[in-house]
Amino acid sequence: ARLANQIAAGEVVERPASVVKELVENSLDSGATKIQIDIERGGHKLIRIRDNGSGIIKEELTLALSRHATSKLKTLDDLENIISLGFRGEALASISSVSRLTLSSKPEAQETAWQAFAEGRDMAVQVQPTSHPNGTTVEVKDLFFNTPARRKFLRTEKTEFAHIDELVKRIALSRFDVAFTLTHNGKVVRQYRSNGSVEANIQRVAQVAGKAFLEQAAFLESGTDGLTLFGWLMPVGTSGTTQYTYVNGRMMRDKLIQHAIRQAYEEIAGSEEVPSFVLYLVLDPRQVDVNVHPAKHEVRFHQARLIHDFIVQAVKQVVSSEQH
Ligand code: ADP
Ligand code: MG
């Protein structure tokens, strides 16, 4: 079972930041309004995510750490040959197979908290009482301790933490209603507060993208029936690395959207340089398939052409009007 899980892990658990992504998404799915992310040594040593979400009842803790072990593959070397393994319902099991993972949780309606972890080659799940407030903590220690080939690909503490920081920024701009705290080696590095006010949301954008971004960027809001684009774009001639796009509230690095934005700037300025932007596309969920890529960065639009042209027009309009 451990081997099958490790193979599944190979697909999405690339580095500490991918672990953080899966765990934070679980916390968000659980309805958490506060998420604390503690990292030690760039995530090599420790990744700990605490939330105040729904929690997991004792009877389901074992299930949460399990997946179907159906793979007939014999060695991890076959890893590269598999591209189609799904990842749904496998994140915790996969991460657990390549680290020392404990899952502690307490739903509000349950008197005591319980902790689960998987052990040995068959990954038998042990459950024991623990103390924990309402919500869930997942602690991941010693990532890739048992998969030296993967561990070799880990970069320096600083680089891995930079990936985590970048990821948390992206997530923070996807959920203004959730408070996030990020610590590294015991120090608070980011604190994204949430009190529901527009000011707090704007402040978060400034925290993530910088004050200059908010001062210089044009605000865009454009909609046709069932299709809305809003957010901020820097003017032509600036350069930036904050290039965030969201589709129906989920962060995406979608090629079609990126292409449309690049094309718009190119048509205005004739240059291929793309400045910073933070853009939210909202459309009928039936018009998109979200699970094209297991890491869920990409989507497929049913009316790709239409959406592409809509974005080009919307961006051109606001950016070129700012130029004059
Ligand atoms: P998936 O998220 O695709 O269902 P995971 O392996 O990431 O698969 O998680 C397995 C299950 O564990 C989830 O479906 C959920 O029921 C439960 N779970 C994981 N993390 C949390 C959390 N932070 N709060 C509540 N439930 C959780
Ligand atoms: Mg998950």
Image (spheres, helix red, strand yellow):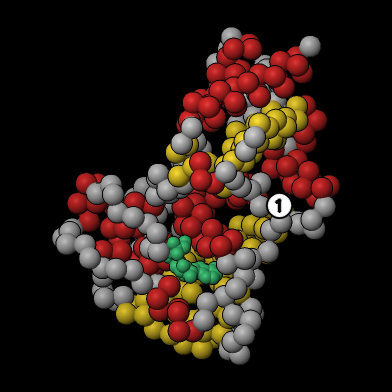
State the quadrant of the N terminus. bottom left
Counting from the top left corner in percent of width and height, residue 48 is at 54, 66
Q: What's the residue at 77%, 18% (across, down)?
A: 322
Counting from the top left corner in percent of width and height, residue 74 is at 16, 60
State the count of labels.
Answer: 1
Counting from the top left corner in percent of width and height, residue 11 is at 34, 51
* Quarter of image, res 235: top right
Q: Eyeballing the image, is 159 above or below 318? A: below
State the quadrant of the C terminus. top right
Q: What's the residue at 61%, 90% (across, down)?
A: 111
Counting from the top left corner in percent of width and height, residue 138 is at 51, 69
Q: Eyeballing the image, is 69 above or below 284? A: below
Three-letter code, disc 1: Phe
Determine whether, in the image, residue 89 is placed left or right of residue 4.
right
Residue where numbered disc 1 is placed: 176
Q: What's the residue at 37%, 57% (across, down)?
A: 87
* SS at circle 1: loop
For label 1, count other residues whose C-alpha is less than 10 Å away and answer few (under 14), some (14-19) or many (20+). Answer: many
Determine whether, in the image, residue 242 is placed left or right of residue 198.
left
The answer to whether residue 57 of the structure is visible from this angle is: yes
Determine whether, in the image, residue 264 is placed left or right of residue 218.
left
Q: Eyeballing the image, is 180 above or below 257? A: below
Q: Residue furthest front?
A: 225
Q: What's the residue at 60%, 73% (across, down)?
A: 54
